[in-house]
Image (tube, grey):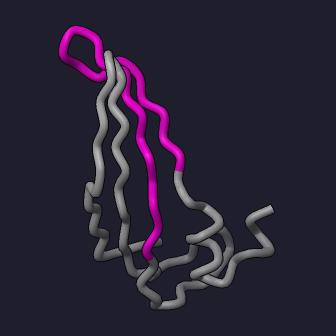
Amino acid sequence: AFSDVEITSSEQLAQGDMVATRVVISAKHTGSFVGEEPTGKTVTYDSVEFSRIEDGKIAETWVTWDKFGLYRQIDALSLAD
């Protein structure tokens, strides 16, 4: 549903065995997504990833992202409920 995806890491914090990373995602809406036809718009939204590190490797990861912001940009707000 999206092409020309660019992911930029903007901040990263670590404390103990946890690492938080904020990224900014930019992509062009070129295919159907959540029932919305492609708009051709370039969208930008934030995502935050929390990772727990164990023995130098990622053991668990949790991701949250700005779903509302993305849906707003492709005019899909009625689907965001």
Q: Is residue 58 within the magenta segment?
A: yes
Quadrant in the rendering for residue 36: bottom right
* Residue shown at the point (39%, 81%) measured from the top left: 28
- Please provide the residue range marked out in magenta: 44-64
Label total for image: 0
Q: Position of residue 68 (x, y in %)?
A: 65, 66
Q: Is residue 20 within the magenta segment?
A: no
The residue lying toward the viewer, choosing from 42 and 31, is 42
Magenta stretch, main secondary structure, is: strand
The C terminus, quarter of image? bottom right
* Residue shown at the point (60%, 61%) measured from the top left: 67
Q: Is residue 64 above or below residue 19?
A: below
Return the residue found at the far top. Answer: 55
Return the residue found at the far left. Answer: 56
Q: Is residue 29 above or below residue 20?
A: below
Q: Is residue 70 left or right of residue 52?
A: right
Q: Position of residue 64 (x, y in %)?
A: 53, 46
Q: Is residue 46 left or right of residue 10?
A: right
Q: Is residue 47 above or below residue 2?
A: above
Q: Position of residue 65 (x, y in %)?
A: 53, 54
* Residue shown at the point (42%, 34%) measured from the top left: 50
* Residue shown at the point (29%, 76%) measured from the top left: 4
